[in-house]
Amino acid sequence: MAEQHFSTALSQWTNTYTGLVKSDFNECGVRYDDAEKACAMNAMTTIYALMKDSGKDMKTFDGNSIRQAVGQAASLRLNATAYPSECFFQIRKKQTPDGEWAPIVEMGIMGAGNDAILRNFGVGVAEVLPAWIVHEGDDFEYPTFNGLEITPPKWTPKAWGGKVVRVCYPVKMQDGKVQYLIAEREGVKINLIAHIRNNLLNETFGICENRYKATKQEKEQIKQAKQQVMDVVTSCATVDDILACPEARPYISMAWLDSTESMIERKMRNNAIRNFPKDYNTMAKRSIIQTDDVYKANQAEIEANANSEELTVEGEVVEEAPFQ
């Protein structure tokens, strides 16, 4: 009976949110095909299971965050139940202007999801070959160029573990040529700094109860304290230095600290394909922007400081922190 109730409840929630996502597609003038519908349904199944496993009630969550997460998976054509994983969902908390924390659902892109995005939206892409995951101690030679001629890179795996220092995507193009998309470990510094900056948004350093109730003087004190932290963080030479930095660690989520190499690899894979030209529709373009670390941190900071000089009461902003 419990299993039947689970299936019935899941069907009801799935029908509700896939219907809302379909409306979003229609409003953007984007065709909602069977593949996108399947991705939306798989996303909803995964989110519902996450709720049940966490002992949470769907009714207590911000419906807009669920709608956005399902829409992101559908528009980017990411299958939440694929293996290897293309996307994942996590429960986070959002602070409201009254200082309360409300649970929301957030989607993230896994390594195979980056492959899928490049395969589905990359301009002129015929095939995305498995990424080379280069570890510290491996032999690697960068590609060289002679006019339009390219000498391919060379990789000899030796370490089979340890620190991931770079990712290289061989991509077959429709004209028969092969491009190599490479991202380095130190490029992840930008992602980690943005992550820390975002997690600092609600920090008050004990100066006041929460930032919404801060006076002008308290806001200035908080701003200076945040800047001191960021000055230390940005002065770190490497991503590993940031991860080990005592001033930074309180504002780094456990996903980074507990699964460091997995997180760094995930960010490198994303960075490798980020600047490759893609042909996104309106829905997919909005979704890829919403999942970008640097954009989210910058946008949250812009919104947090919007009209702060002219108005004493700030507008509602979405801030997120790891769910505890």
Image (cartoon, rainbow, N blue to C red):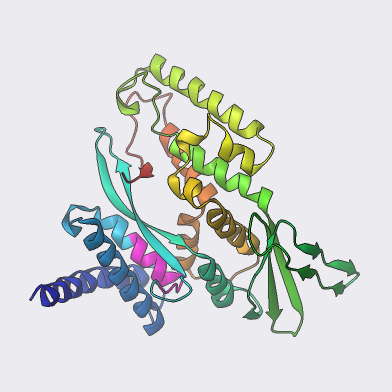
Q: Quadrant of residue 233 in the image?
A: top right
Q: Is residue 98 magenta?
A: no
> Residue at image x 40%, y 82%?
35
- Residue positioned most to the right: 146
- Can I make out residue 23 in this image? no
Is residue 73 toward the left or the right of residue 20 in the image?
right
> Residue at image x 33%, y 20%?
208
Instruction: Give how far across and how far down residue 324 sits, in percent.
Output: 31, 44
Is residue 245 toward the left or the right of residue 87 in the image?
right
Instruction: Give how far across and how far down residue 30 sits, in percent.
Output: 41, 74
Q: How many discs mark residues in the rendered view?
A: 0
Q: What span is in magenta?
A: 68-79
User: Where does the N terminus fall, quadrant-wise?
Assistant: bottom left
Q: Compare residues 119 and 112 and report the one nearer the observer.
A: 112
Q: Compare residues 101 and 74 and report the one nearer the observer.
A: 101
Is residue 275 toward the left or the right of residue 303 in the image?
right
> Residue at image x 37%, y 45%?
322
Above or below 190: residue 273 = below
Q: Compare residues 188 and 177 and report the one nearer the observer.
A: 188
Above or below 219: residue 55 = below
> Residue at image x 44%, y 66%?
87
Instruction: Give how far across and how far down residue 9 sits, in percent.
Output: 15, 71
Q: Main secondary structure of the magenta part?
A: helix
Instruction: Give how far across and how far down residue 273 sits, in percent.
Output: 63, 64
- Residue positioned most to the top: 217
Is residue 47 toward the left or the right of residue 2 in the image?
right
Q: Quadrant of residue 182 in the image?
A: bottom right
- Can I make out residue 24 in this image? yes
